[in-house]
Image: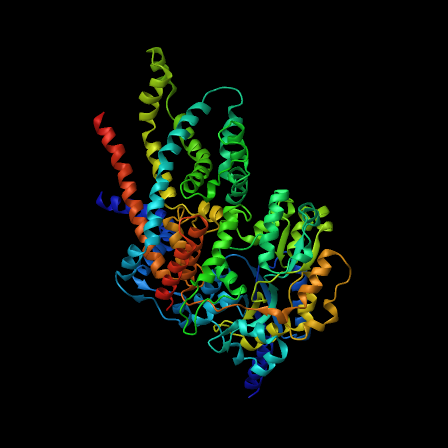
Amino acid sequence: MRRQAWTTTLVAYAFLAPALVLMGLFTFYPVLYGAYLGFTQYTAANLGSGEPPRWVGGQNFALVLRDPLFQTGILNSLKYLVVVPILQIASLAVAVLVNQKLPFMAFFRAGYYIPVITSISLAAVMWEWIFQKDGFLNWSLRLIGFFNQGGQFNWLLNEHTALWVIMLVTFWRGFGYYMVLYLAGLQAIPGELEEAATLDGASPWQRFWRIIVPLMRPTILLCSLLSTIAAIRVLEEILVFTGGTGGPLNSTYTALLYVYNKSLGLDFNYGVASAAGLLIALVGFGLSYLNFRITREDRGER
Amino acid sequence: MIKRLLAAGAMVLGLSAFAQTQIEFWTYYLSPNFDNYIKSTIADFEKANPIIKVKWVDKQDTMERDLTASIALGKAPDVVNLWQDSTFAGAQNGILLPITQVVSRSVLDQLYYPNVLDIFNVEGQVYGLPWYGWLDQGVMMYNPDLFAKAGVDVKSIKNTDDLLAVSEKIKKATGAYGWLPAVKDPNGASFLGRFFLEGLSIYDKDGKANFNSAAHVALLQKYVDAMKNDVIPQELLRKEAFQLSNELYSQGKSAIIVGAPTSLNRVKESNPDLYKKTKIASAPLGKAGIQTGGAMDLVIPKASKNQAAAARFALFVTNRANQVKFANVVPIVSTAKGSESDPGLKAKSDDPLEVGKGMNSSSGRLINPGFKPPKNTDDIYKNFNDNIEAAFLGKKSAKQALDDAVAFWNANAK
C-alpha cells in the first residue's frame, strides 16, 4: 500500500517534470537572479570589463527609496489603482448585459473585445486625435457649450488631467478582456437559480447583487487581482502618450517607468533597476494580499 | 609518414575553409527603406574581399540594449552603427575599441572631416568611423502661400529672432504656426542646444554649469512667452519638434520646417500638392552663426572576434564613394573629406528635394557637434528637461528653473 502511494507520487512528478523544468528555467531562475541583482552593483561598465555583479547589500534600496523620482513613481502608480474598481464594476455589468439572449449580442461581444486586440501604438494615434488641443473632445465640449468658441484645454499637458486621461485609455483597453472573463463565469451559473429568484419576485437589481455577484466572487477576485497587478505595472500607455518622459511635470511618471529608464539606454544600471523592481513587486504582493483578505472576510459574514 | 602528411594537408584545407570570415554588421533603423543601398554596398564589398562575408542585421529601438546583451552573451557583433551619445556611453563603459588601434590617425585625417572626427573623440581617443551626418538647421522649407497671406518676405528672415517674429506674424494672420523649435525633445536636452546656437555658454573651463546668467534667462523667457501666446504650440513639450513640424506642415497648419531636407519625403507622401509648392531657403542661424549637427558612426566592439575584417568593412562603408551614393538615395550629409566639391552631390533639377539635397549633402564641413554632454547624462538631462518644462508650464520662473538645473548639474556631474 505504501509502496503504491510512493509510485503514484513518482508518476505524478514525472508528468509535472517538463512543466517544472521550463518554469524553473524561464520563471524561477530569472526572478531569483533579478532579486539577487537588486543587491549588487551591476552596470554596463561591468559588461565592458567582464566583471561579475558586486554585492553591495541594501545600498541600491536606500538610493531608490531616497530618489524623489521613485517616490513620485510609486505615488502615481498607486493613483493608477483607481482604475481597478471602476473597470471591474463596468465590465461585470456589461458582461451581464451581453449575456442576454437577444439578437446581435455576438456583435456587441465582439465589438467590446476589439480594443483588447488593438495594438497600443494604433490606440495611441486614435486617442491623440481625441485629446489633442484641437481634438474631438474639445470640439464636443465646445459644441455642448462647455467651452466658449476658441476655448481649448490641453488634456495631456495639464498635470492634473494627464494621468486620468491615460487611465481612461487603460480602461478602454482592459474592458473587453475582463468582460470576456466575466462572461465565462456567468455562463457557469446555473439558470435555475435566476429562474427561482425571478419566481420569488426578485427585481433584476436584486438578482444581480444577491445571486450573480456572490456566485461570481472567484472570478471577481481573479479579475481584480489581474487588474491591480496590471495597474501597478503600467508602462506602455505612459511611453506612447508622453514620449517616455512621464510628463507633464512628472505627473504621469510611474514606478515602472523608473525601472525602465534606469535599466535601458547604455547606462544599464541593472542593480538599481532590479532594486526598484523588487520594491514594486513588494507593493504588488501587499495589494494582492489585501484583495484576498477583502473577499475572505465577506465570505465569513454570510 | 603518409598519414601525417595527409593530416597536415587536411589541416591546411580546413584552415583555408575557415579563412572565410563572417562579420556581423548592425545598422540603426535603415531597413526596409534602404535595403537596396545597404545590400548593394555589402555585395560590392564582398566582391572586392571574397574571404569576408557580411551578415547584415538592422536594429531598431532596442539597439543599445541588444548590443550590451550580445556582448554579455559573448556574441558581439563586429561593426555597429552608433551615434555621439551612445558612442560616448559605450566608450566610457569600456565596451568599444579605440578605432586608432586598427586604423592609423593619419589615415583617419585623410578620409574624414576633422570636425566630424572630433564628435567621436572621447578623452583623446577616436572611437568611431564617421558615417552619414545631418545638420540640425539644415535648410528652411516653407509654404509660400502662408507667407504671402501673412505678408512675410523670406529675405527678411536672417536669424532665429527673425524666425520667432515671423512666426508670430503668420500665427496672427493665418492661424497657422510658423516655426516649431525644439524646446524639450524626449531625447537629449534641446534647450541647451538653443543656448549654444545663440552663443551662450553651457559650462565653464572646469565643467561647472553656468547657463543661468541674465542672458540665458532672457532667452528662455522669450520662448516661454512665445508658447504662452501660442506662437509656438504647447505640444512641443510632449512631442519631438521634428515629428510635430512634419505633421502640422503637411496639414497646412504650420508654415516652416527648419531641418534636414529629408523631412520633405514625408510631406511628399502625405501632401504631394504642398510638396510641389514648397520653397527652400538657407536656414536662419542663431547669434553664434553655426550649424549644429551630428553624424552616425561605425564602431567596433572590443569583444569583436574579427576586428581587422570589421575595420576593413567599416572603412569601405564610410568611404566617400559610398557616402555620395547614399546621399543620392536619401539626402544625408556626407562626412567624407572632399565631399564639398564632389560632382555626385550637385543638384540635378529644381525639384525642392533636389535643391535642398544639393545644399545639404555637401556641407559636412559645417557640422558643429556642439558641446560635449556631461557624465551621468541621463539624470542630468532629465532634471534639466523637467525644469525647462516647469518654466514653460508656468510652474517656475525662467530664472528659478535655470538656477535649479545648474545646481543639480553641478551636484551630480561626476
Horizontal relation, residue A285 to residue B132: left or right: left
Q: Where is residue A54 drawn, in percent x and y?
A: 31, 67
Instruction: Tell me what residue is drawn at x 75 percent, y 70 percent.
Output: B343
As rendered, which of B12 and B404 lies closer to the eye? Answer: B404
Coloring scheme used: rainbow
Q: Where is residue B210 drawn, in percent x and y?
A: 42, 66
Q: Where is residue B383 drawn, in percent x and y?
A: 40, 57
Of all residues, the one furthest to the right in this rendering is B349
Can I make out residue A277 in this image? Answer: no
Horizontal relation, residue B268 to residue B161: left or right: right
Horizontal relation, residue B301 to residue B402: left or right: right
Residue B176 figure quarter: top right
Q: Is residue B24 above or below residue A12?
A: below
Exactly how many numbered labels are in the figure? Answer: 0
As rendered, which of A176 and B276 lies closer to the eye? Answer: B276
Q: Quadrant of the N terminus of chain A?
A: top left
Can I make out residue A262 in this image? Answer: yes
Q: Quadrant of the C terminus of chain A?
A: top left
Instruction: Tell me what residue is drawn at x 29 percent, y 56 percent.
Output: A66
Of all residues, the one furthest to the bottom in this rendering is B1
Residue A198 figure quarter: top left
As rendered, which of A264 and B223 lies closer to the eye? Answer: B223
Instruction: Tell me what residue is drawn at x 60 percent, y 45 percent.
Output: B171
Q: Where is residue B191 drawn, in percent x and y?
A: 49, 59
Horizontal relation, residue A55 to residue B331: left or right: left
Residue B262 figure quarter: bottom right
